[in-house]
Amino acid sequence: MTIAVVGAGAFGTSLAIALARDGSDVVLWGRDREAMAAMQDQRSGGKRLPGFALPDSLVVTSNPADLPRGICLVSVPTQVLGAFLQETDLTARYIVACCKGIDRSSGLGPVETIKKQRPDTIAGMLTGPSFAVDIAAGLPTALVLACQDDTAGAELQASLTRPTLRLYRTTDVTGAELGGALKNVVALAAGMTVGAGLGDSARASVIARGFAEMTRFATAKGAMSDTLNGLSGLGDLVLTCTSEKSRNFAAGMAFGRGDTPPSATIEGIATSLAIRAEAQDAGLDLPLLTTVAQVVGGELDISSAIATLLARPVGKE
């Protein structure tokens, strides 16, 4: 079965390379005709993923008619996923989101967004600890495939697993969506801690307390705690909070230094703002995640944010 990857950014391109490395037929689609033609002609990862050769079985195109109708991996930012699905004629049997976050306008995660826009397809999500350059280089990477239909999930798992790309499946879509979304907010907090010069001990505390808040919010929404304890929660959290290759961690460092974060997609910013009101309405105590929302929303500067958190009363672990 030919696999389609829609979205030729770094992550989409890396997945296409990994899936085609064993000779499988893969089609990578992007909007930019000139860029796609250059990638196809030069057999390279392009501007977003330079230095990586494309396998012979990988076809790069800007023509939607070239997309197969079996499995389609969609690698576009969560905040534009809904509009993208409205505008793009995808007729695949399976549509799998390869993005993380909560849509601010709808409050939906990636899988629920797909189900809303494409009710006749089977929706899934790939999430977990991964960087595009590691996947493209063939370094061992473990991901979670979330799909409410376990039979469909097993078929997708078999079709997408590769020797260095290991997929573990779950039917807990809520847990997978929220783990992938909330860890970005905690990564912003961890980056702010390092950027403000508070040290690695403080960062470790932020990761631990942030994970507790992630679990509190997700389980209140119906997620299973085991999902948060796995690859899509704790695993992704550790990676995102400890590497400057993480866009969210790097953006947090910029906030911590008092600088303007880079203009790249920072899903944690939108997610923090999306969950803040929902957490307050539900009466959930999420001081760290709420403070991040206040900082990125311009309500608190980093010094005031630190003072606010340190002034909270101590309690039981």
Image (tube, rainbow, N blue to C red):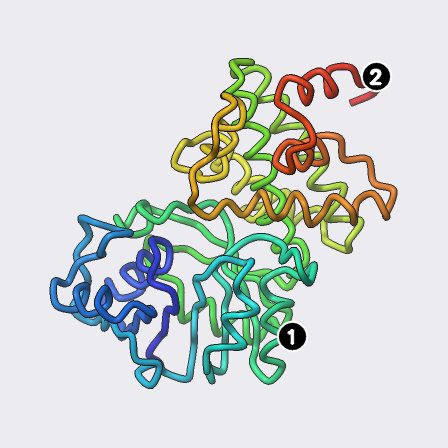
Is label 1 in contact with label 2 (beta carbons under 8 Å)? no
Q: Nearer the viewer, residue 232 or 121?
A: 121
The numbered mark, 1 or 2, whose residue comes first in the sequence reads: 1
Task: Assign the C terminus to one quadrant of the image.
Answer: top right
Q: Secondary structure at mark 2?
A: loop
- Which residue is the site of mark 2? 313
x, y percent for residue 75: 43, 62
Task: Assign the N terminus to one quadrant of the image.
Answer: bottom left
x, y percent for residue 98: 47, 60
User: Which quadrant holds residue 310?
Assistant: top right
- Which residue is the site of mark 1? 116
Q: Secondary structure at mark 1?
A: helix
* Amino acid found under the numbered disc labelled 1: Lys
Q: Residue furthest left?
A: 42
Task: Give the residue displayed 50% in from the left and 21% down from the top.
Answer: 257
Q: Nearer the viewer, residue 200 or 198?
A: 198
User: Which quadrant holds residue 229?
Assistant: top right
Task: Give the residue displayed 64% in from the left and 67% down from the top.
Answer: 112
Above or below residue 155? Residue 191 is above
x, y percent for residue 157: 47, 67
Q: Nearer the viewer, residue 84 or 200?
A: 84
Whole-angstrom CA distance, mark 1 to mark 2, is 43 Å
Task: Give the residue displayed 22% in from the left and 56% down from the top.
Answer: 46
Above or below residue 8? Residue 277 is above
